[in-house]
Image: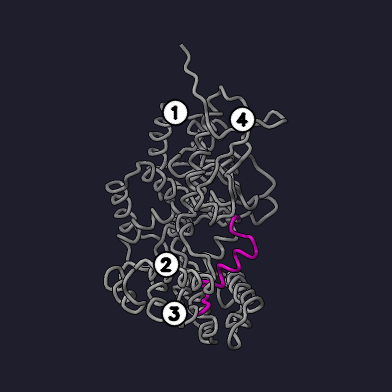
Amino acid sequence: MAITMKLKHLVALKNGSIKFKRRLPVDVFRASGKEFFEITMKNSDTTTVNFHKEYEVFMREWQAFVDAYGARKTSDVRTPEERYKDALRQRTELLTGVRGLDQWEARDLILEKVGSELDPLVRSVLINPDAGPPPFTLEDARNKYVKDKGIAGNIKKMQRLDRAFERLAQAGLVAEELALVDLKKAHGQAWLDTLKEYRNENTGKPYAVDTMQRMTTDLKAVVNHAISFIDFDKPVTNPFMRLPFPEKDQQRAVEVVTSMPDEILSQITARIDERSRISELAILWRLLVVTGCRLSEIGFLQMQDVDLEGSQTGGIPVVHVRPNEFRRIKDLGGMRTLPLTGEGLDAARKHIAQRRSEGASPHDAIFPAYAKVKNNENTTATAAANLSKTLMKHVRAVASDHRLVVHSLRHRLLDRLRDAGASEAVRDPFAGHSPRSTGDKTYGSVEARVRELHRWIEKAAP
């Protein structure tokens, strides 16, 4: 007997397609500006396995969207004036709730009984109702900018703004406490110094000058917007204007990442094997070691991207680095076919056999715990960042040298190839760089190129 399950949150469109449309919680709606999470589905036949898989992905993505706004959904976006008026209203309600006492006696009684439970501003106006509204802070300026510009529902813009304010906190500038009228040039210098000192926890690289300028532009816009639409008691200086950014060649990273030593690598591998709660992580790590690929290139592979039989490469097992539904490739140089050897090959064989036994299709992710379908521009970046943080916890637990990061595996492989005598034409595919000569770009079969790469990678013995 067939079992029919009615799926919720589906809307039939006139063209025959089906849209996933699920209402967002009220608090998330207030934070994001979006009432629904909605995406047109690729599959329209509700009886197929692929439709149900896609539906499950969207259900997870709905939850991910809700979680992404978890930090902001409780934020207070009222202006200081609005908060002050609300506090005065609550003061009146509290005082009128006490009978038989004058307002000063009632105030003292309230403070004694529930003073510690009151909102700080309510407690302040209860003590002194003529104190006036709190100062307009940098956080208030941010909230006004987001509200007036209507960008709360734009994930990319909100992430950029959140990232800038995270760096502000690292610079010792607490946005919730820093009044705009107190902004000084020293605040801009502290911000710039923090940007210069920043190092990516995965690659160890500093910010590019263009990135520093882009983040600063966001801050300038927030402050300028407040200056334009808020009446302040005294002039406000925007300290993020005309900052002396370094020349681009001065900010170039030199030896910010170093090659991973064998001893450290062994310790990290053992730690991942022993402590990782997700078994996929140990397989993924070993593939990074033997291929020199970027983290997202391995983390978001599909089943069809790994050919263990070497059907088109003369029997040499390979991994195809190419665009798929989980990630894109920025340039053609990043598309390549690399041989699999050693522990990476052994781990891939066992893992893929297990995935096939679970019913994974060629289009399914090899590492489903990490790969997410790209139904919005933020999904891949978020998944890659989470994966990077997970691996870096293991790296940092073993390696105290800040130059040793996940990216150090790429340096290690390329150093091994260089020491073995491999030319740039051999090293470039492992690095994901475009071939430097016309001949390397144009001539020769994939099988011949893989044979050459395989010979050198076995010499390098990563």
Q: Amino acid at mark 1?
A: Arg
Say which residue appears at 32% left-offset and 49% top-offset: 272
> Residue 240 location, x and y as percent?
59, 80
Which disc is residue 257 wearing?
A: none
> Circle 1 is placed at which residue position?
356
> Circle 2 is placed at which residue position?
93
Which mark lies nearer to you, 1 or 4?
Answer: 4
> Circle 3 is placed at which residue position?
129
| Placement of 394 over or under 370, stated as above or below | below
The first of marks 3 and 1 along the sequence is 3
> Circle 4 is placed at which residue position?
43
Comparing 279 with 98, the one in front is 98
Classify mark 2: helix, strand or loop.
helix
Say which residue appears at 60% left-offset and 63% top-offset: 147
Classify mark 3: helix, strand or loop.
loop
In this picture, which residue range is highlighted in magenta? 135-153
Give the CA distance from mark 3 to mark 2. Answer: 13 Å
Q: Residues within 10 Å of mark 2 (few under 14, many from 20)?
A: few
Q: Are marks 3 and 1 in contact (CB under 8 Å)?
A: no
Give the CA distance from mark 3 to mark 1. Answer: 70 Å
Magenta stretch mostly in which secondary structure?
helix
Magenta stretch: residue 141 in it?
A: yes
The image quarter in which residue 447 lies:
top right
Give the CA distance from mark 2 to mark 4. Answer: 56 Å
Classify mark 1: helix, strand or loop.
helix
